[in-house]
Amino acid sequence: MTDTSLPPDVTALSFEDALAQLEKIVRELEAGQSRLEDAIAGYERGAHLKAHCEAKLREAQAKVERIARTASGTVTTAPAGIE
């Protein structure tokens, strides 16, 4: 599932590539050497990359967990048993 509000070039990235780009943007912003316009553009791209990474993590979590009901009726998550 992809987020249509994110730029297509961001949604096409793997988790690892998006995270690497996000880390680079954070380092550049922390350095404080960018022009204001560049810093704003970097912040916006970083927000898109962060949202993409979070979505990828949610997808991965959904693949490795399943919903389970205990004998007492409590709902929990359990490993999906993917081999």
Image (tube, rainbow, N blue to C red):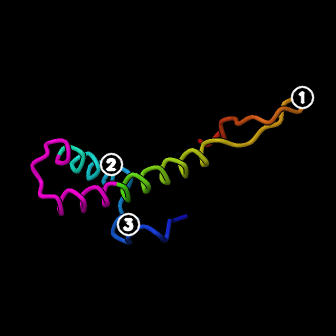
Residue 45 placement (x, y as % from top left): 30, 60
What residue do we see at 13% from left, 42% from top?
A: 31
- Which residue is most to the right? 72
Q: SS class of the residue under badge 2?
A: helix
Q: CA distance from mark 2 to mark 3?
A: 13 Å
Q: Is residue 82 left or right of 54 when viewed as pictured? A: right
What is the CA distance from the residue labelled 1 to the residue labelled 3? 43 Å
Q: Is residue 54 above or below residue 71?
A: below
Q: Residues within 10 Å of mark 1 (few under 14, many from 20)?
A: few
Q: Secondary structure at mark 1?
A: loop
Number of marks in picture: 3
Q: Is residue 35 magenta?
A: yes
Quarter of the picture containing the C terminus is top right
Mark 1 or 2: the one toward you: 2
N-terminal of the pair, mark 1 or mark 2, is 2
Check disc 2 and give the amino acid type: Leu
Question: Percent position (x, y) of residue 28?
Answer: 16, 48
The magenta region covers 28-46
In whole angstroms, how far apart are the C-alphas of marks 1 and 2?
41 Å
Q: Residue furthest front?
A: 36
Relative placement, left or right, of 72 versus 52 is right
Q: Which residue in the structure is indicated by mark 2?
A: 19
Q: Is residue 55 magenta?
A: no
Name the amino acid type tagged 3: Ala
Is residue 15 positioned above or below 73 on the image? Answer: below
Residue 12 is marked as: 3
Quadrant that contains the N terminus: bottom right
* Image coords of residue 14 (percent x, y): 37, 57
Label 1, on which residue?
A: 71
Disc 2 vs disc 3: Cβ atoms closer than 8 Å? no
